[in-house]
């Protein structure tokens, strides 16, 4: 697979985002009837009353826009500057900012004030859009792509992840998914190229960081040696710890992380202090690369704990 960066990945590297299009627009008193009242007869509309001097508005606005984009047409958003549209704010009794009105079927449906966390924003919009048909959300697309990747179809999964990134370049799960697709088909250079272009905040995300660790593990495996020779050495001497450690790396590089964990746990059982606790440190990396809820991580941590407290 050859990495071809679309506009989404390029924007992610630059720290920018995609155009919101007609899903999100600036409104005025003059355009309110068309942009909100009439438009809400077809699709629910939220109206964000904000002001340039309002600190919480600067937190809420981007969060609202993010969730609206992710809902892909199930809801639209209009932003109203209260200082420029005081008559409209007065008619709707906006007494503080931010205030967010939801309109449905041409009339007010719900309202909240203040900066809410993203989880409460999602809940607010889900109540508003209940029963409204829209395109699958970006999170739905990511879930489908992850299933494709797990089933072994890395190339189709990569196309789905790229589609998400075209709409939301900062979508961490899609970024991590695309990176895993590249690793799955052996395109390490492309994975490195994409990682090098990501902004710092995205690199710190748990899913992206996990793939970065997986890449480091694969690179470590490159010089581990042949599994057949390493197994032969262990047959001769079961306490050849370097051979067992290298065998674990070789297994991981060959796409057999379960076997890698088995060997590292056995090494830890035989000599936990060997090479400055190398077996445990490598196990932690494998668990991070797999993700906290992966069955390999769950069982591996349980087995490691049993050895630690034996």
Image (cartoon, rainbow, N blue to C red):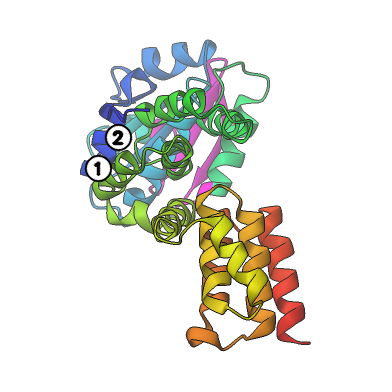
Q: At which x and y percent is residue 162?
A: 40, 28
- Circle count: 2
Give the alpha-carbon distance from disc 1 to disc 2, as whole Å: 6 Å
- Residue 258 falls in which quadrant of the image? bottom right
Q: Which residue is mark 1?
A: 13
Res 93 visible:
no
Q: Which residue is outermost to the front?
A: 236
Tell whether label 2 touches label 1 (CB within 8 Å).
yes
Q: Which residue is mark 2?
A: 9
Crowding at mark 2 (Cα within 10 Å: few <14, some 14-19, many 20+): many
- Residue 14 falls in which quadrant of the image? top left
Assign the N terminus to one quadrant of the image.
top left
Label drawn at residue 89: none
Residue at x 31% of width, y 17% of height: 31
- Residue 76 falls in which quadrant of the image? top left
Front residue of 112/144: it is 144
Front residue of 196/238: it is 238
Residue at x 44% of width, y 23% of height: 159
Which residue range is magenta in the image? 90-118
Residue at x 43% of width, y 43% of height: 99
Q: At which x and y percent is residue 175?
A: 41, 41
Specify whether residue 107 is painted magenta: yes
Q: At which x and y percent is residue 112?
A: 52, 44
Secondary structure under the numbered disc 2 in the rendered image: helix
Front residue of 298/230: it is 230
Specify whether residue 68 is painted magenta: no
Q: Is residue 25 above or below residue 254?
A: above
Classify residue 185 as left or right of residue 137: left
Q: Is residue 171 above or below residue 28?
A: below
Q: At which x and y percent is residue 225?
A: 46, 59
């Amino acid at each position: 697979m050859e990495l071809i960066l679309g506009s989404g990945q390029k924007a992610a590297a630059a720290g920018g985002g995609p155009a919101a299009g007609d899903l999100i627009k600036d409104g005025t008193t003059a355009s309110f009837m068309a942009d909100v009242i009439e438009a809400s007869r077809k699709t629910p509309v939220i109206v964000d009353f904000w002001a340039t001097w309002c600190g919480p508005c600067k937190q809420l606005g981007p969060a609202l826009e993010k969730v609206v984009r992710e809902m892909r047409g199930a809801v639209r958003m209009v932003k109203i500057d209260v200082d420029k549209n005081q008559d409209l704010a007065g008619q709707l009794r906006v007494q503080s900012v931010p205030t967010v009105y939801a309109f449905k079927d041409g009339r007010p449906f719900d309202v909240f004030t203040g900066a809410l966390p993203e989880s409460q924003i999602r809940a607010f919009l889900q109540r508003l859009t209940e029963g409204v048909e829209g395109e699958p959300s970006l999170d739905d697309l990511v879930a489908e792509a992850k299933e494709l990747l797990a089933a072994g179809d890395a190339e189709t999964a990569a196309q789905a992840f790229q589609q998400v990134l075209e709409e939301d370049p900062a979508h961490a799960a899609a970024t991590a998914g695309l990176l895993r697709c590249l690793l799955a088909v052996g395109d390490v250079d492309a994975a490195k190229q994409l990682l090098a272009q990501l902004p710092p905040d995205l690199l710190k995300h748990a899913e992206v960081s996990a793939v970065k660790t997986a890449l480091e593990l694969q690179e470590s495996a490159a010089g581990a040696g042949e599994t057949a020779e390493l197994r032969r050495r262990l047959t001769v001497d079961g306490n050849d710890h370097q051979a067992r450690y290298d065998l674990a790396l070789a297994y991981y590089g060959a796409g057999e992380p379960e076997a890698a964990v088995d060997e590292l746990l056995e090494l830890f059982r035989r000599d936990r202090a060997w090479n400055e606790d190398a077996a445990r440190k490598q196990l932690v990396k494998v668990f991070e690369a797999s993700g906290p809820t992966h069955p390999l991580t769950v069982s591996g941590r349980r087995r490691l704990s049993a050895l630690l407290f034996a």
